[in-house]
Each structure stands twice: as C-alpha cells, then as structure tokens.
Amino acid sequence: MIIKNNSTSLIISLLFLLILPFVQKQWFNLYLFNINNISFYSILYYLSGIICPSLICFNSLNNFTYYKFNEYKIASNKIIKGKALLLLVVVNLLFLSYLITEYFYINFDLITNLFLEGVNFQEPEILQLFIFVFFVAIFLIFMKSRRLFKKLILINFIFISFFIWYLQINNIKIDDQFHIYKYYQLDNINLINVLNLLLIEIFYFTWSFLSYKSNLSDWIIHKPSKGDMNPLFKIFIFYFFIIFYYSILT
C-alpha cells in the first residue's frame, strides 16, 4: 500500500511538472503588461520559483532517502565480497563524499558573490578538499548521520535554487566569478543544480544499498534484485521530468 501511494504521488508530481512551466510563462507574460507595478500576476510569478524546488525536496525526502531492500538467504553465486566489494565501497563512498563537498561549496560561493561583496572566499586546496571529503565520508558510514546529510543536501539544493531564481528575476548575469558557471560552462544553471543533485541521488542510493543493515560488518552483500533497483528507476524518471521542466522554463 505504501509503495502504491508513493507511486501515485510520484505520477501526480510528474504530471504537475509537465504543466507548471507553461503556466509560469503565462504568469510572466501577464506580469509584463504591468511591469512597473506590483500586481497579482507578478506575485504569482515570483512565488512560482519555489514550487519546483519544494516539490523536488519533498519527493526526494519521502521517496529517495529511506531505502529498504529485499532480505533473503544469500546464495553463494549471488554475492559480492572481498576485493570486489572493497572497490565498490571505496569508489562509491569517495565519489559521494566529493559530490557532497562540491555541492556545499557551490552554495557558499553563491552566497559570497551575491551578498558578501569584498569577502574573498578562496577555493579549497587539494589538502583541504581531501580533509573535507574524508570528514563527509566518515559521517556517511553511519545511517543516522547519512540521513542527516541527505536532509542538509536538500536544504542546500533549495537554497541554491532560490539564489538562482533571485539571479533570474533580477537579471543578474552569471560569469566566471561564480563557481557554478566557471567549472560547468552551461548557460542553464538550473540544469547544473539539478544534475548535481541527480548524481548525489544515484550515489546515495548505491551507498544505501552497499551499507544496508549488516552488509559492511559482514563484508558481504547480495547482488541487487529487480525490486532493489526500482527506486533507481524512479530516480531517473523523476529527474528526467525535472530536467524537462527547467529546459522548457528557460
């Protein structure tokens, strides 16, 4: 029943995302008729910038955070252990930790460039970056702190989305002084924001699978079943529509 309800809410959200960009454009066109004054449609247009980020956070928190995987007796020919498991754990944990560290830095960079003029926020050096990544990796090992980080990531996402919306409605151009543009070279910075979150979602899912219950302490995991992979499929479907939304909106 829970799975069915989650699927229904996901479908409703996706249908809503198909309609929203066209509605926003209509609000914007109506707002242009009276651009010098605050109107009902200008308020609607300004507030509409928080709808999609809020929807993403709500769906991610409810559908892509608390994973449960199938539990059954492990057959000897369907397990991963030893060096293969070590490689999976190290690669996934390092990539996820790096992505999280990079994502938080994007937010700090936006804040300093937009609101803290004169404050020179230096990019971390390799040693500093390694320390940050190592620090994040330690916390990702434990379930409670991992879920806390996921919530912080979503808060970070919504702040970045608000800052981007602020840039757009105030016609502030993005240039090389912004980390989010300098290293990605995409004009649609909303897509950069979403793609960063998508990568984190993918590695968070795989790390949740690898570290599920006693997998790491037993140093053995079963190969994922089709049911285990369903959340990953939903992630790709959901973010495909999110990318479609921001592509239409731009």
Image (cartoon, rainbow, N blue to C red):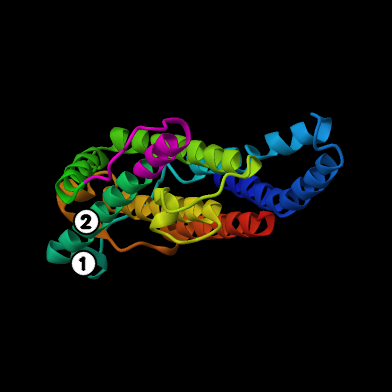
Which residue lies most toward the front here? 118
Q: Taking 115 as reference, is 208 left or right?
A: left
SS for tag 1? helix
The foreground one among 156 and 164 is 164
Cα separation between marks 2 and 1: 20 Å
- The quarter of the displayed image where residue 132 is located: top left
- Locate residue 16 relative to residue 138 in the image: left or right: right
What numbered label is drawn on residue 89?
2
Residue at image point 73% right, 48% down: 20
Q: Nearer the viewer, mark 2 or mark 1?
A: 2
SS of the residue under disc 2: helix
Residue 238 counted in the magenta span? no
Tell me which label, 2 or 1, sits earlier in the chain.
1
Decide: few, some or many residues near mark 2? Use Cα within 10 Å; few <14, some 14-19, many ≥20. some
Q: Position of residue 79 (x, y in %)?
A: 23, 64
Work out whether residue 98 can be spotted: yes
The foreground one among 73 and 173 is 173
| Boundaries of the magenta span | 105-124
Is 122 one of the magenta-colored residues? yes
Q: Residue furthest bottom?
A: 77
Task: State the residue position of label 1.
Answer: 76
Q: Is residue 174 left or right of residue 90?
A: right
Q: Please name the residue shown 55% across and 51% down the image.
A: 190
Residue density around tag 1, few if under 14, some if 14–19, many if 20 or more, within 10 Å: few
**Residues under numbered marks 2 and 1 in contact, where contact means CB atoms less than 8 Å apart:** no
- The answer to whether residue 1 shows anywhere in this view is no
What amino acid is at disc 1? Ser
